Image: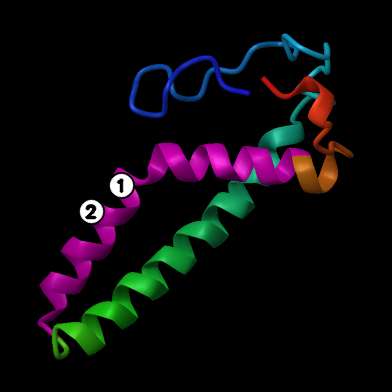
Amino acid sequence: MFTHSALNLKKFDQMPEKCPFCGFRYEIELGFYWGAMYMSYGLSVLIVLIVGVSLYFLANDPPTWVYLTAVAGTVILLTPVLFRYARVLMLYLFGSVSFDPKYKR
């Protein structure tokens, strides 16, 4: 669905116009992926909760700067992945897309 690896920080968000296998047009309507911002926000909040609770129980409630550093670092490092998952979820949940095994590579 994406043209480059998530590790390529300059091009991790680039998508082809159509699927090379089935010809499906990825951008169903103009601004379709704006809703993915809310999904990305929800995924980020989930990560913040997981990291925060993990630090609380595993590191015996460290100082506030440890929480801020760990949470910010984790979310920043996972931004390309969160971006992609949010777009895929948006397309799957609201774009009427389902997996068809005959197009599997």
Q: Amino acid at mark 2?
A: Gly
User: Could you tell me which secondary element the residue under label 1 belongs to?
Assistant: helix
Tell me the number on the disc at residue 59.
none
Q: Which residues are magenta?
A: 62-91
Of the 4 image quadrants, the one containing the C terminus is: top right
Secondary structure character of the magenta stretch overall: helix
Indicate whether 3 appears above or below 82. Answer: above
Residue 37 drawn in magenta:
no
> In the rendered structure, are the residues bearing label 2 and label 1 in contact, judged by CB atoms less than 8 Å apart?
yes
Query: Residue 15, position in %: x, y?
Result: 60, 18
Indicate whether 79 appears above or below 70. Answer: above
Q: Residue at x 84, y 36 (%)?
A: 97
Query: Residue 12, position in %: x, y?
Result: 44, 24
Query: Residue 56, position in %: x, y?
Result: 24, 86
> In the displayed structure, does residue 30 sit left or right of residue 14?
right
- Quadrant location of residue 95? top right
Q: How many marks?
A: 2
> In the displayed structure, does residue 96 sit left or right of residue 34?
right
> In the displayed structure, does residue 70 sit left or right of residue 17?
left
Residue 68 drawn in magenta:
yes
- Quadrant location of residue 91? top right
Q: Residue at x 38, y 73 (%)?
A: 50
Q: Residues within 10 Å of mark 2 (few under 14, many from 20)?
A: few
Q: Is residue 29 visible?
A: no
Residue hosting label 1: 76
Residue hosting label 2: 73
Q: Colour scheme used in the picture?
A: rainbow
Q: Residues within 10 Å of mark 1 (few under 14, many from 20)?
A: few
Q: Residue at x 62, y 53 (%)?
A: 39
Indicate whether 98 appears above or below 10. Answer: below
